[in-house]
Image: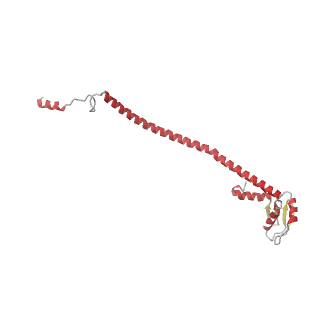
Amino acid sequence: MSEDSAARTAAAWEVPAIDGSDGKGYLTAGRLQELQQQAYDEAFQKGHAEGVAAGEQTIRQRAARYDELLRALSKPFDQLDESVEKQLVELAIAMVKQLFRREIKINPTHVIGVVRESVQLLPIASRNVQVHLHPDDASLVRESLSPAEGEPAWSIVEDPLIAHGGCRITTDNSQIDATAEARLQAVINNILGDERAGD
């Protein structure tokens, strides 16, 4: 080997850094600590990301279970609402019936207005008009009411099956049910609407 080539080779060779600062060379305690910290940081970030993802999954699952529980808890309240509504309607109907009966007892002359209104619903040409009344109401109507001008002539028939305060009118070809029960049911149906008309 010539001196020139040996000098060139000697000039090109560099002494390796023994502290590992050039990325080559021997591992030193500092470089080893650096690598450990880097590995720790990478593992920490990976573990943190996985932990966050697992936590989000757990939260989603718990939220879904919570929603299911809330829906399950609301069902009894829906049924309770329906039950309370039904009971309130039944209570209101019972109260209306009691008030209706009480009013008929306190003022039995209401039957006169019922008879008059019912007879006026008949066509003028109606024949054989009979007004069926409770015996107590019949005597009151006989004393207080007679066919008005323009109304068909009618006669009173005592019927103990008809409740106080109502009447049933029959003719040869028609019938008007103005019994207390029928009038009360009409009032209730009017208030509650057609959905309870069949109840």
Residue for point 66% across, 48% down? 81
Judge whether 19 appears above or below 57 on screen.
above
Would residue 92 be visible to someone looking at this image? yes
Residue 20 position, x and y percent, is 28, 30
Residue 67 position, x and y percent, is 56, 43
Quarter holding the N terminus?
Answer: top left
Q: Quadrant of residue 158?
A: bottom right
Q: Residue furthest bottom?
A: 150
Judge whether 141 appears above or below 37 on screen.
below
Judge whether 180 appears above or below 85 on screen.
below
Would residue 163 be visible to someone looking at this image? no
Residue 77 position, x and y percent, is 64, 45
* Left or right: 86 in relation to 140: left
Q: Quadrant of residue 111?
A: bottom right
Quarter holding the C terminus?
Answer: bottom right
Q: Quadrant of residue 28?
A: top left
